[in-house]
Amino acid sequence: MIDEIENGIYYELFPSLWKTILGLAKTYQTQIFASTHSLECIRGLLPTIKNNEQEVMLLRAERENGSSGITPITGEFFEAALEQNFEVR
C-alpha cells in the first residue's frame, strides 16, 4: 500500500514511476495499492495502462446517500476514461 503516491515527485516523472511500479509488481508477483488525489498522477498512468489493461484497475471510493462504497473500474474502461478526459477521481 502506497498512500498519496504523488507526494514529493515531479509531475513529469509520473509515467516512469507507474511503469516502474508495474514492472516491480510483475517481477515480484504482487499487487500494489496506491492512493492519490492528484489527477496529474492518475493521468501519468495512461502510458502504462496501454498494453497492460488486464494488470491495472481503479478502485474508486464513492459516497452516496450517506453510504460509502467502492466502484471497481477495469483497466480497459480506466484507459478509455483517461483518454476522453473524464473525471475519475
Image: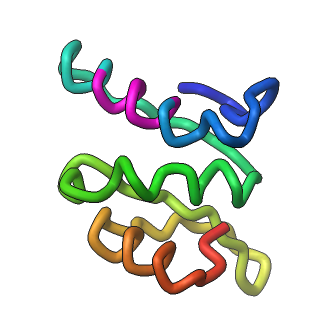
Q: Is 61 on the left or on the right of 54, as rendered?
A: right
Residue 81 x, y percent position in the rendering:
47, 79
At 74% across and 28% down in the image, what residue appears?
Answer: 9
In depth, the one of 14 and 70 nearer the eye is 14
Identified at 41% across, 70% down, the residue is 78
Task: Residue 20: give x, y in percent of width and height.
Answer: 40, 25
Which residue occupies the foreground of this view, 59 or 89?
89
Q: Does 62 sit above or below residue 26?
A: below
At a point 72% along the width and 74% down the height, the residue shown is 63
Q: In this view, does 28 lie above or below 53?
A: above
Give the residues in magenta.
Answer: 17-23
Q: Residue at x 71, y 82 (%)?
A: 64
Give the colour scheme shown: rainbow
Q: In this view, does 7 lie to the left or right of 79?
A: right
Name the main secondary structure of what is drawn in magenta. Answer: helix
Residue 52 vs 72, above or below: the answer is above
Q: In which quarter of the image is the C terminus?
A: bottom right
The x, y position of residue 49, in whole percent, is 33, 54
Q: How many marks?
A: 0
What is the quadrant of the N terminus in the image?
A: top right
Q: Is residue 21 magenta?
A: yes
Which quarter of the picture shows residue 13?
Answer: top right
Q: Nearer the viewer, residue 41 or 33?
A: 41
Residue 4 or 49: which is nearer the viewer? 49
Q: Is residue 43 magenta?
A: no
Tell me: 59 left or right of 27: right
Q: Which residue lies furthest to the front in this view?
A: 12
Q: Residue furthest top?
A: 28
- Residue 83 placed where, x, y %? 46, 77
Residue 76 located left or right of residue 67: left
